[in-house]
Image (cartoon, helix red, strand yellow):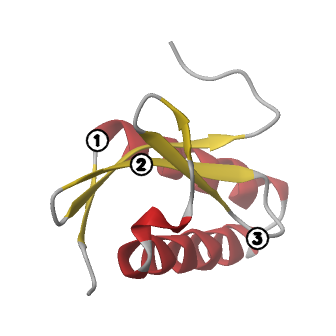
Amino acid sequence: MVHKLIIKPGAEQDLREALEWYKKERSGLEVELYRKVTEVFEDIAKNPEQYQKRYRNIRIRYTRKFKYGVHYTIEDDMIYVHAILHTSRKPRK
């Protein structure tokens, strides 16, 4: 069963900022990051419980190549993406 994925505003902002940063670094790299994050979304929607809880009810699925973790929770048949964070940077406050 594929779950419905809802991306919270903070996670959308995280993704926008990451895409802008990679675009400044090297044009076209932001497209590759977007593809990788989209693959993670698809994977989570298909198999949300595959990834263990890291703290409280938050689960994290990491991207390949890029060092980002998609932080999400499962509630019934809904998946809420709360943050998309780089593993080496300080999180937002």
Residue corresponding to mark 2: 72
SS category of the residue bearing label 1: helix
Name the foreground residue: 93 vs 81: 81
Name the mark on residue 57.
none
Name the mark on residue 29.
3
Q: Residue furthest bottom?
A: 1
Q: Is residue 20 visible?
A: no
Residue 4 image-quadrant placement: bottom left
Q: Does residue 1 appear to the left or right of 62 in the view shown?
A: left
Identify the amino acid type marked 2. Tyr
User: Which of label 2 and label 3 is nearer to you?
Assistant: 2
SS category of the residue bearing label 3: helix
Total number of numbered discs in the rendering: 3
Q: Position of residue 32 (x, y in %)?
A: 70, 77
Q: Position of residue 42 (x, y in %)?
A: 44, 80
Residue corresponding to mark 1: 9
SS category of the residue bearing label 2: strand
Around disc 2, counting alpha carbons within 10 Å, would you say few (fewer than 14), some (14 to 19), or many (20 or more)?
Answer: many
Query: Is residue 93 placed above or below 68 in the rendered structure?
Result: above
Around disc 1, counting alpha carbons within 10 Å, would you say few (fewer than 14), some (14 to 19), or many (20 or more)?
Answer: few
Q: Is residue 41 visible?
A: yes
Query: Is residue 37 placed above or below 70 in the rendered structure?
Result: below
